[in-house]
Amino acid sequence: MKPEFPNLLAFDTSTDRLSVAVQRAADGARFTHTGAGGAQSSATLIPTVQALLAQAGLALGDLRAIVFGRGPGSFTGLRTACAVAQGLAYGARGGAGVPVLPVDTLLAVAEGARQSLSPAPAELRVLALLDARMGEVYAAEYAWSSAVGWQGLAEAAVLPPEGVAVPPAGTLLAGNAAAVYADRLPAALRALPRADVLPTAEALLALAPALLAAGRAVPADQALPLYIRDKVAQTTAERQAAGLLR
């Protein structure tokens, strides 16, 4: 019988916060780290992974999979996550490698919001919104039920805060966009119950069993980012026009 808690490494570098966790199958124990993300992730992620694996008494070859937040999010952060996931996966088991499990960061936001509720609801609808910079937000909507788990209601999109559609009453608004764009989101959206959460490695670990069972793990060379916006940055003129420069 497969362990209830497989050996897993998970990390997310899609925001300004680095989140890393290792789960040990023997007892379900988790070893976690949260620190500064952004550009620092490229320098600190691998040493952090090595330290957590050592705490757990595990080697890369012991892992069932390497789970990572594939985006949307920071372009630099997503490239770091994919490169590290590929490198670690290729280097495990004498070069035979371990599978990687890409997970949508907005789904991780939804799961983190669900975990923040007590008691945990049997059913839940979540609108996940993350700051996409350049005056825009990443948005996706999900529904949870204890019977079937998570289901996506709309694919991830990038759009101005004013363009976010207002979901049904009772929907949980999750992420950091409500705090960043409080004056630009529709008033009806700001009135929804709210969970100010970011994607975390712990949320990725919670999502992993169902995704693994669904066959979502892939070979290392398929550790690819989810970009839903091609343009990385605005020109100075565009930023001035949008009121982002003073």
Image: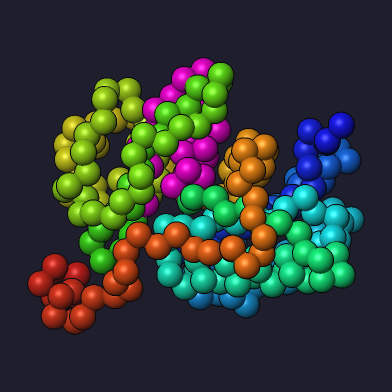
Nearer to me, 34 or 138: 138
Tell me, yes or no, whether the highlighted magenta stretch contains residue 183.
no
Horizontal placement of 236 versus 96: left or right? left
| In the rendered image, the vertical position of residue 3 relative to residue 244, given as above or below | above
Left or right placement of residue 80 versus residue 26 in this view: left
The scheme the figure's colours follow is: rainbow
Residue extending furthest bottom? Answer: 236
Instruction: Work out whether 94 lies above or below 11.
Output: below
> 52 or 154: which is nearer to us?
154
State the residue at coordinates (23%, 61%): 135
Vertically, is 46 above or below 117?
below
User: Residue 155, image x and y in percent?
Assistant: 35, 44
Residue 190 x %, y %: 24, 37
Q: Give the range drawn in magenta.
A: 106-130
Say which quadrant the C terminus sits in: bottom left
Residue at 26% x, 25% y is 168
**Quadrant of the snapshot with the N terminus:** top right
User: Where is residue 224 drawn, in percent x and y?
Assistant: 53, 64
Residue 241: percent from the left, percent from the top? 10, 72
Identify the image quadrant of residue 223. bottom right
State whether residue 20 appears in this view.
Answer: no
Report whether 208 appears left or right of 148. right
